[in-house]
Amino acid sequence: MVKWIVAGGVIFMAATYAVGIHKIHSHNHSFLIEMGDSQAEFEALFKAIEKQTGYRVLVTSGYRSYEEQVRLKKQNSKNAAPGRSPHQYKRAMDINLISFSGLIRKSDTKARWNSTGVPQLAKERGFRWGGDFNTYHDPVHFELRSE
């Protein structure tokens, strides 16, 4: 039996929603397993975000090799130089937020991100938020502070 649900003015099939959530978690897991000692802290953050805010987390970037960082620096001079990105040291992940009302991503404003409560939640857990960077708009970026 197919059950229909209405959320935020949008009608979804419950079965389709459940499949989508499973795919998101599988997708995220493929990034998380590359994070080494930082994996548990990111998993705890993502679970807290989903429980406390109602947003689903979609990981868009995690660990990056030196070569990947070289490529990204060539694409955008404001990206961290190779050897200077916390992504290369398994200390940072980039995420988007998903809800029934849509997707929150890098192009969204700092105010929109703040309205989700996610940056504050991350800071309370010891993460640095890219939305606070002075020279680069990077609200999708969450990194573990150096010990």
Image: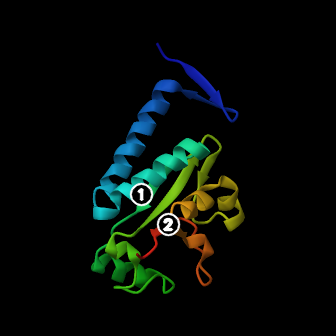
Q: Position of residue 58 (x, y in %)?
A: 47, 52
**Residue 130 image point, x, y percent:** 55, 72
The residue tagged with tag 1: helix, strand or loop? helix
Q: Is residue 1 above or below residue 37?
A: above
Q: Say if residue 140 shows up in the picture.
A: yes
Q: Say above or below: 47 vs 135.
A: above
* Horizontal relation, residue 86 to residue 123: left or right: left
Looking at the rendered structure, the secondary structure element under dot 2 is strand
70 with respect to 144 (left or right): left
Please report the residue visible at 47 percent of the width from the left and 46 percent of the height from the top: 47
Q: Which residue is painted at 34% across and 85% down in the image?
A: 83
User: Badge 1, how many Cα within 10 Å: few under 14, some, many 20+?
Assistant: many
Query: Height in image: 142 above or below 21?
Result: below
Q: Amino acid at mark 1?
A: Phe
Residue 85, percent across and down?
A: 40, 79
From what the image shows, is residue 100 above or below residue 45? above
Identity of the residue drawn at 59% across and 51% down = 103
Mark toward the start of the polypeptide (2 vs 1): 1
Left or right: 74, with 123 as reference point = left
Q: Which residue has dot 2 on it? A: 142
Return the residue at label 1: 42
Among the 4 quarters of the image, the one containing residue 6? top right
